[in-house]
Image (cartoon, rainbow, N blue to C red):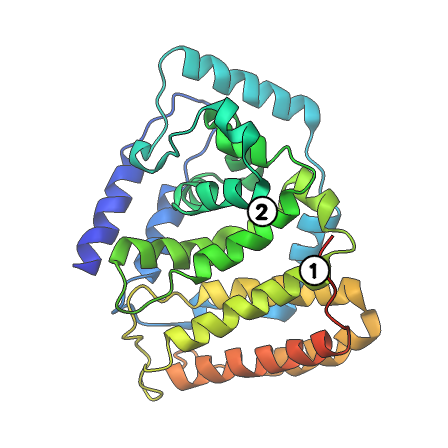
Amino acid sequence: MNRVIIICVFLVVASISFGQGQTQERSFIVSEELNSLNASNEITKENFYFPTDKLEYIRRCIYESSDDEISMKRYEDDLRKSIADGNVGPWQNLVPKLTREECIKMPTSELAQVCFSTSLFTRLLLLYDKPVHAFSVAKVRYPCYEELFNRDDLWQGILGAYSIYSSGLDPKGEPNNVMDAIIGLDNLPLVFQCNKMREQLKGRELLFIRAQVNALKKIRLYIKNDDDNSTVSATPFFSVTAPISMINHSLVFAQKVSEEKSKTLIDNISKLQLSTKPKMGDIKNYIDISIAEFQQLLNSYPEKKSD
């Protein structure tokens, strides 16, 4: 059943034509990502994104990259023309059915619930080579995302998204909801490349480390019954890239919080060795150690009310 769901989703993605010459669809990446969510998928070294290889790249994407406003305006103008010509976006069954006026009146916490209770946003992130294009498509096509991504408290909505996706991690849950949760946690960190979110992230890194650590704890509970000696996850849709993505982004945030304190944390996590076919016990250990290391950092900073 799980395999059928994954194949169906990929076939929908592969059959979509947006009519936009500038847009490259990530059909191959989508298929790879969704295949990795198969409960019987074997976990290999290629699934892992080791911190020593990725941290500098992530740091540049978040803190140094800047969207070309002129080219993005042209991209969004082309998209609006395509919509005016009758182009319909993918996954219409996942689109929140709200008017612009209704979205404007909603508090950010409720608006985030609407935006992230379906996998529409993260599927868009999978579909485009550049996350910034997915942000533009979401904002231009759907009023709820336009409203949320233009708010000065967008960061609160993204914090809420981690809780929303984590709440869907139930091995016995409805398959589509579980798959949405895994894809969501795997790809949500890409939102930090959005200009608006990039601006609001500064000085709030600890809040997002805490949110990602809480999500890691939920993932750890999600796979607790997997056989430690198996290289195959028996838990539906588990994708090791989800915890790896959050761990790597939290490491980058830790560097921003304190260069001194993050050195030991990064060294301890980076030293963990995983075989080319790691056992589930090794993956659990990796998550456990990462949680413990981040918890030490968080404990050294009293939790404050978010502002």
Task: Please name the amino acid that badge 2 sits on.
Answer: Gly
Q: Can residue 262 be seen in this view?
A: yes
- Name the spot of residue 90 as percent of width and height, x first: 34, 32
The quarter of the displayed image where residue 33 is located: bottom left
* Nearest to N terminus: mark 2 or mark 1: 1
- Name the spot of residue 162 as percent of width and height, x first: 52, 57
Tell us which disc is closer to us: 2 or 1: 2
Mark 1, Cα crowd under 10 Å, few <14 / some 14-19 / many 20+, is: few
Q: Which of 130 and 255 is in front in this view?
A: 255
- Name the spot of residue 112 as percent of width and height, x first: 52, 44
Task: Please name the amino acid that badge 1 sits on.
Answer: Glu
The alpha-carbon separation of the residues under discs 2 and 1 comes to 26 Å
Mark 2, Cα crowd under 10 Å, few <14 / some 14-19 / many 20+, is: many
Image point (46%, 64%), residue name: 241
The quarter of the displayed image where residue 2 is located: bottom left
Total numbered badges shown on the rendered structure? 2
Determine whether 89 is above or below 11 in the image.
above
Mark 1 highlights which residue? 56
Answer left or right for 26 relative to 301. Answer: left
Check residue 200 in the rendering and tell me which mark sits there, or answer none.
none
Q: Farthest residue in the bottom direction?
A: 229
Image point (68%, 34%), residue name: 67
Q: Nearer the viewer, residue 38 or 166?
A: 166
Q: Can residue 138 be seen in this view?
A: no
Check residue 157 in the rendering and tell me which mark sits there, or answer none.
2
Determine whether 84 is above or below 162 in the image.
above
- Name the spot of residue 71 as percent of width and height, x first: 64, 24
Identify the element where label 1 is drawn. helix
